[in-house]
Amino acid sequence: MHNKLVVAGAGWLGMPVAQAAAAQGWQVQATRRQPHDDELSRQLVHDGKTLVHNVSLQQAFWLCAMPPGARREDSNYLETLEATLALATELQMSGFLLCSSTGVYADADGHYTEQGALAATDSRRQRILQQAEQLVLSHGGKVLRLAGLVGPGREPGQFIAGKALRSSAQERVNMVHRDDVVAAIMCVMSQWPQARAVYNICSPAHPLKRDYYQAHCAQAGTTPPSFASDDSKARIIDGSAIEALGFSYQHAI
């Protein structure tokens, strides 16, 4: 195995992965649209015509942690991903791992494994997510479908405080802590030949949204959110398949 990693999109999730790999002795290049002044930092941005970059690692693993972006100005996500895959191929990548979302699954109640029904692509974001997954899988890459992310700077008691949510108070939470995602990414890359093509990454805890957010808001001293309904709903994302690689979830959500 070549201990080299290129992180495309070294933001809130990507940078901790880059740092974790570097701490384990990997050679790492971490890209942003505008490079920062540190030894890991590189540039990678699509200017509408071509991929502008200074990535040079040969035979590295690639992690795409760029958010798909629902905004119009982020509409070149697929174009950027395609060009990034071409660059990774040119640099003889060892493997390509895409951070996707459990938002690709249907909204209906049910217990969703990696074989779960994908959403009918009503929304632009779901369409982009599904196209991105197909693109990566067609290049022999792998996909991690991430549940709702929590962690430093994304504390539920803060980001949900006082909001009027469109969901039901009785819905189940599908969340995962950033540290568990970082560990899952390192686990898949270090066991690449054995790893499946697609994994859900979601905490095994699925409390009711009302209980979950009330507890976090009480802890943060903020106002709990209100919910659109009290309808019973059970849509559960099953993130247990990756445990076959020896991975275990460590962090409370």
Image (cartoon, helix red, strand yellow):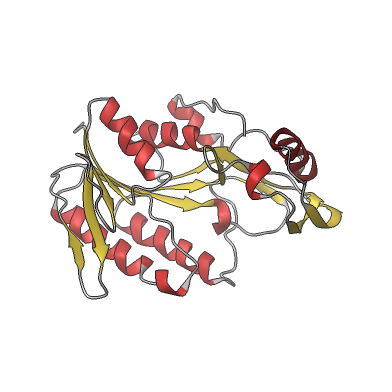
Identify the image quadrant of residue 84: bottom left
Lateral position of residue 231 relative to residue 216, left or right: right
Residue 226 spot, x, y in % from top left: 80, 54
Q: Which residue is located at x 57 percent, y 59 percent?
A: 118
Please state the horizontal and vertical placement of residue 245, each as a whole percent of the image. Answer: 43, 28
Is residue 15 among what the camera can see?
yes
Quarter the C terminus occupies:
top right
Q: Where the N terminus falls, by quadrant?
A: top left
User: What residue sits 27% from the left and 57% below the top?
Assistant: 34
In percent of width and height, residue 247 lies at: 47, 27
Q: Quadrant of residue 134?
A: bottom left
Q: Along the horizontal axis of the image, is 228 left or right of 185?
A: right
Residue furthest to the right in view is 230
Whether residue 104 sits left or right of residue 80 in the image: it is right
Query: Residue extending furthest front?
Result: 221
Task: Indicate whether 97 appears above or below 127.
Answer: above
> Depth check: 119 or 147 in front?
147
